[in-house]
Amino acid sequence: MTAERHGTLVITGAAGFVGSHLVAHLAAASDAPSRVVGADLRVGAPGAVEWVSCDLASAPEAAALVKRFAPHTIIHLAGLAAGGDLHACFAANVQAAANLLAAAAAAGEAARVVIVGSAAQYGVTTGDYEVVDEGRPLLGRTPYAVTKTLQERWALAYADSGALEVVCVRPFNLMGPGQPPGLVPAAFLQQVAEVVDGKRAEVCVGNTATSRDFTDVRDAVAALWALATTPARVTGEVFNLASGQAVRIADLLEACLALAGRPVPVRRDAARLRSEDVPTIVGDAGKLRRATGWRPRISWQQSLHDMWNVVRQRGG
């Protein structure tokens, strides 16, 4: 990775959970690019980032973004994680990436593009304890998983053609300050805060007997930047982003309850149970470590404590 490539970075989805942490990481990084552009449907607060409102599902808007900023590096975080609108999911996760890649290739710059997918692409695994590496078949069948897989395969076609340096990443469960409240453990913490504030009587949970692989989002963005800048040959490669450790959801819940500083009633809600829950799934991030030297630094306990502080600062 040359110094020139550090010149201009475009982050799509920069105002989201991961994007905002990536912006913060670069603000403190010694190897930060000279210019950071945040592209999103919504724009963030003024600062070191140049914000631009952009709908990547529109090919002309994607082309205009690349033409205006001529990025040396793109980290593509924009997408749609949930919702029942299949057309919207395809537009946000597949069409947007296709438009961005086409625009970057047409610009003629040998840009490095980091495409961020999801461990959801692996789908439901079969065993009681699964350690998943990048060679595992992609069996995900949800709209999110399918569209992220299509996004990845289309991106890798650009790498195979030599038109772009493309790196694909499959993050496992992320946590950390600002995590959307619909996801574990943010959903637990939000409910605990509401019990403490007298807004609800109990915390409702689903299956807590499973274990998952959690990485703090601040470690995750460090990994993304490492892949964006490593001098190692990573084009056309796919990397898991994971801690490699299993965390019991029951332990996560107990730690959330302890933060309340008082007893908190818990009720198992049948509506939150899933028939597909795999007992334990862990990501193998050895390939990422070998390419970049990256290792997670923030424990899940510290991450949870930092999340709780943010929830309480926001008034539950």
Image (spheres, rainbow, N blue to C red):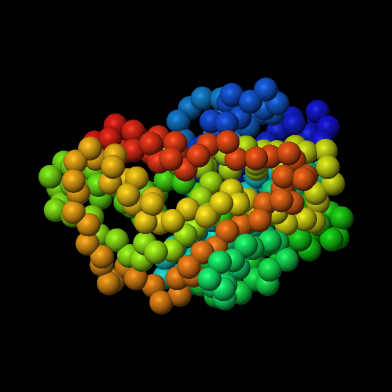
Within the image, what quadrant is residue 305 found in? top left
Residue placed most toward the observer, 95 or 275: 275
| Residue 196 picture quarter | top left
Q: Is residue 199 left or right of residue 315?
A: left
> Residue drawn at (48%, 68%), measured in percent from left and top?
279
Is residue 59 shown left or right of residue 142?
right
Where residue 225 appears, as percent x and y from the top left, is 67, 38
Residue 290 shows in this picture: yes
In-front residue for pair 79/211: 211
Q: Please provide percent x and percent y for residue 286.
A: 71, 51
- From the viewer's perspective, tell me whether residue 91 is left or right of residue 203: right
- Residue 52 coordinates in the image, percent (x, y): 55, 39
Query: Is residue 40 in view?
Result: no
How many numbered discs? 0
Q: Is residue 82 above or below residue 175?
A: below
Q: Residue at x 36, y 62 (%)?
A: 208
The residue lying at 77 percent from left, 55 percent from top is 237
Given residues 106 and 187, the one toward you in this image is: 187
Q: Residue at x 76, y 61 (%)?
A: 156
Quadrant, the C terminus: top left
For residue 160, which quarter of the picture?
bottom right
Image position, residue 1 (x, y; %): 82, 36
Query: Looking at the picture, does residue 110 appear above or below residue 129?
Result: above
Question: Which residue reaches farthest right?
Answer: 162
